[in-house]
Amino acid sequence: METNLQNKAIEVYKRLDKEYPDAACSLNHKNPLQLLISTILSAQCTDRQVNKITPELFSKYKTARDFAEANLDELKRIVRPAGFYNSKTRAIKEAMKIIHERHNGEIPKTLEELTRLPGVGRKTANVVLGDGFNIPCIVVDTHVKRLSKRIGLTNSNDPTRIEFDLMKIFPKETWIKLGHLMIDHGRKVCNARKPECRICILKDLCNYHLSTKGEKQ
């Protein structure tokens, strides 16, 4: 059973990789610190909007110490367009203070250390590990969750469980890009309310499409 699922997973990856060869992190960043901050800002906000905010933010603040010692009102002014700016600003300042004081200004490279930081959950930590440090991991966001369930790669609703299920069936060297591929496909084809099954390159592999509901799309 698992072998069949692994074969299916490999075929899913091959097709998505062919369709979206340039799939990559859409948050503009030059280093892991910038990526961590951008990912915190991206909660309940589009990556495009975050990318409009960060040029000013990163030109003004360059190190963990800079952010930790930043004027709160000025930081809020810049971050405000990302929404939930009070909580995001507080999380950024507190996280950067910890990084400055306990990690010599360097972003931690383990899931355990990252998730101890304010405003950093498992998904954010995996973004930083994968795209910031090239450490193999799978980011499970709403698109990855939706596609994984529809295709039949997992039966779980829990993001952590889904992450582990995908890690079992996808080769380790595909983990980082897998999330970006699924996100691109989720945004362009397999959207939440009305998936475009008729044009989907995965429809013959997809449990959702092969079901009665999927056939009606």
Image: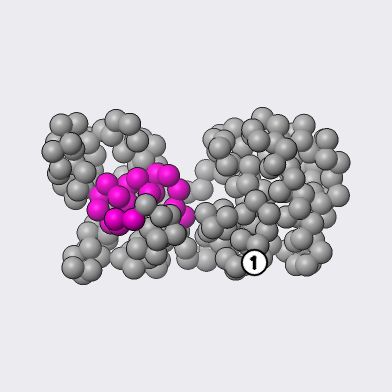
Residue in view at x 66 percent, y 30 percent: 81
The N terminus: image quadrant:
bottom left
Residue 119 spot, x, y in % from top left: 65, 51
172 or 92, nearer to the observer: 92
Q: Give the total number of marks visible in the rendering.
A: 1
Position of residue 62 relative to residue 74, above or below, is: below
Q: Which residue is mark 1?
A: 113
Q: Is residue 162 left or right of residue 1?
A: right
On the rendered image, what quadrant is the C terminus found in?
top left
Residue 80 screen position, x and y as percent: 70, 32
Task: State whether residue 76 appears in this view.
Answer: yes
Taking 34 as reference, is 121 left or right? left
Q: State the residue in front, 39 or 43.
A: 43
Q: Does the magenta segment cover residue 194?
A: no
**Camera-nearest residue between 189 and 92:** 92
Is there any visible trace of residue 23 in the rendered image? no
SS label for mark 1: helix
Question: In which quarter of the view is residue 10 placed?
Answer: bottom left
Residue 23 at x, y percent in the picture: 43, 47
Q: Left or right: 60 with respect to 145? A: right
List x then y, in percent, for residue 41: 63, 42
Q: Is residue 153 magenta?
A: yes
Dividing the picture into quarters, in which one does residue 59 lie?
top right
Residue at (39, 64) in percent of width and height:
164
- Magenta stretch in the rendered image: 139-156
Describe residue 39's horizontal placement relative to residue 209 as left or right. right
Quadrant assignment, res 175: bottom left
Identity of the amino acid at label 1? Glu
Residue at point 52%, 43% (across, down) = 26
